Image (tube, helix red, strand yellow):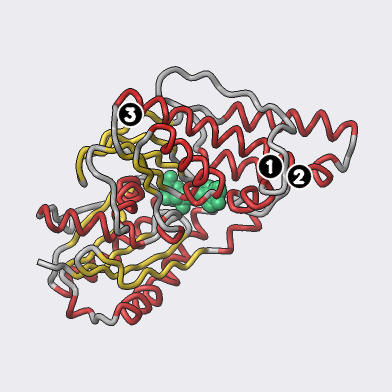
Amino acid sequence: MKPVILAIESSCDETSAAVLENGKVLSNIVSSQLAHAKYGGVVPEIASRLHQQDIIAVVHEALEKSGKTRTDLDAIAFTRGPGLLGSLLVGTCFAKSYAFGLGIPLIEVNHMQAHVLANFLSDSPPAFPFLCLTVSGGHTQIVLVRNYLDMEVIGQTLDDAAGEAYDKAGKIMGLPYPAGPVIDKLAKEGNIDFHDFPIPSIPGLNFSFSGLKTNLLYFLRDNLALNPDFIQQNINDICASYQHRIVSYLLAKLKKAAREYKVKDLAIAGGVSANSELRRQFGETCEKLQVRPHIPAFQFCTDNAGMIGIAAHFKYLAGEFADLEAVPFTREG
Ligand SMILES: Nc1ncnc2c1ncn2[C@@H]1O[C@H](COP(=O)(O)OP(=O)(O)OP(=O)(O)O)[C@@H](O)[C@H]1O
Ligand SMILES: [Mg+2]
């Protein structure tokens, strides 16, 4: 069986559709909503309206680029959650209607599991069991992955996500949204020792990022009182030292988890796994631990339907289908 699956992702501010055949991505179209930039964060009502406006064109383009037609499809997959309710509803309703109209199965996908499974869109995927550090706009998790559909969160943030730590810092410093890629770029020219941001001491494998953001706020407030141009004059150094703390904190916890769980493969996933410093230091960490590193290709780190498609592929093979009653969920648990 080599299923051809159309996957839809609409959980936040990316409208995306992908076509996969036997777990290989034939097309992966991502339409990012730029309208949120001027608000410094995603506006849910605008997000759902833009999904509604864009979804048909995005699906058409994905089908066209894949060389398949709708009669070739064996199933339709969609992100059921977590995410923004209005945004999820657009993808969910579209997927249900399309599957119903074509008379083919519907597959619901958990967005966070899909981020992890993006590591299987590779020629050398991880071997089970492995640990995945999933770092995104709304989550920071260390996940024990026993099998494609058998995962357990063994550590997570108690407050802000790593992506939020980037985006909120960007907002404080007047950088465009999303600030992650901007801070990544500015940090390349900066000094990591410029300011020693405190590491929150949270026991076990959990994280906390809210103190880091507050420390940045007070550090800037105090320095701006002495020099109104403090941010402009030191932006690269501020970004480098702030990012250094985030990356070293994430990897210290991942290292602790790897030792505890004695796995041979480690992976990273989610939007923040596109970060160049995290990718570089993750490679070094794996070398020191003598484990195999796995990092998704850039296009599969931030939200995309390719990752929804690979998760759906494994569900299809396992015979796990959804019914038309499936409704979105905004949070887990
Ligand atoms: N190069 C980068 N460096 C650091 N952060 C980055 C980079 N590229 C993207 N990000 C961050 O990734 C986040 C977006 O990732 P993603 O699309 O996976 O999140 P999300 O889907 O909104 O949240 P979730 O997956 O938790 O529901 C943003 O916070 C963004 O700033
Ligand atoms: Mg995401």
Q: Secondary structure at mark 2?
A: helix
- Could you tell me which residue is drawn at 32 percent across and 38 percent down? 332
Out of 272 and 259, give the one closest to the viewer.
259
Residue indicated by mark 1: 239
Q: What amino acid does circle 2 point to? A: Ile
Where residue 46 sits: x, y (%)? 52, 60
Residue indicated by mark 2: 235
Q: Earlier in the sequence, mark 3 or mark 2?
A: 3
- Could you tell me which residue is drawn at 60 percent across and 45 percent down? 167
Where residue 250 sits: x, y (%)? 49, 33
Is residue 121 found left or right of 234 in the rendered image? left
Is residue 26 found left or right of 37 in the rendered image? left
- Could you tell me which residue is drawn at 61 percent across and 39 percent down? 243
Where residue 67 sits: x, y (%)? 28, 82
Q: Secondary structure at mark 1?
A: helix
Residue indicated by mark 3: 154
Q: What amino acid does circle 1 point to? A: Cys
Residue 242 visible? The answer is yes
